[in-house]
């Protein structure tokens, strides 16, 4: 569950970093922390205010080493502190399609929103990014 108040540890948690002793993952640069805070305020908090179930972070900030190990995209917004992968549950059931729909319904100022894996009705998680550009780009990755 995501706390309403910004907590950097929610956004830097990484099993990959822990397993591989990548300590830089847990102490991002100041600019990354600032961007994660903006992501939290502009995307995550409004979702917490309007969703009735449990919202959790699958992945957020990734230092370059972690991003490489998880085969993340080069230039990933995760490395800049601009992206979060979210999972939404209602009564213990994953309903990420409702999360995706809520981002759109609230007209949140996202840069990208991506339904990732799963199926077209219910993705495994929803990637949402926030940046200075906010292109309002919608994608599906299968």
Image: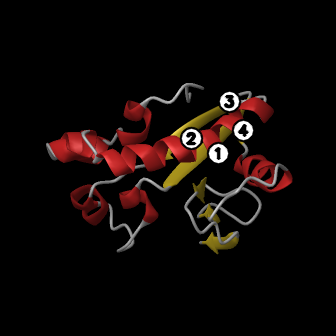
| Contact, mark 2 vs mark 1 (Cβ under 8 Å) | yes
Q: Quadrant of the C terminus?
A: bottom right
Instruction: From the viewer's side, name the closer residue of 73 and 116.
Output: 73
Q: Earlier in the sequence, mark 1 or mark 3?
A: 1
Which label belongs to residue 32? none
Dot 1: element? helix
Crowdedness near tag 1: few (<14), some (14–19) or many (≥20) residues, C-alpha within 10 Å: some
Give the vertical position of 36 relative to 112 (above or below).
above
Q: Quadrant of residue 94?
A: top right
Residue 124 x, y percent position in the rendering: 60, 54
- The residue depicted at 59 percent of the width and 72 percent of the height is 141
CA gap between label 1 and label 4 equals 7 Å
- Name the quadrant of the N terminus: top right
- Measuring 26% from the left and 39% from the top, which residue is drawn there? 26
Which residue carries the number 1 mark?
42
Q: Is residue 49 above or below residue 33?
A: above
Q: Tell me the residue that label 2 is attached to.
A: 40
């Amino acid at each position: 569950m995501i706390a309403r108040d910004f907590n950097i540890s929610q956004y830097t948690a990484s099993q990959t970093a822990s397993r591989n002793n990548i300590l830089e993952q847990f102490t991002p640069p100041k600019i990354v922390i600032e961007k994660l805070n903006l992501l939290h305020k502009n995307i995550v908090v409004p979702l917490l205010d309007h969703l009735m179930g449990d919202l959790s972070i699958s992945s957020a900030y990734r230092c370059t080493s972690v991003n490489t190990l998880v085969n993340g995209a080069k230039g990933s917004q995760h490395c800049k502190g601009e992206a979060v992968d979210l999972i939404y549950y209602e009564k213990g059931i994953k309903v990420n399609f409702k999360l995706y729909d809520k981002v759109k319904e609230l007209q949140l100022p996202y840069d990208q929103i991506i339904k990732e894996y799963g199926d077209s009705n219910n993705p495994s998680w929803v990637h949402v990014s926030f940046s200075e550009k906010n292109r309002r780009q919608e994608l599906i990755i299968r």
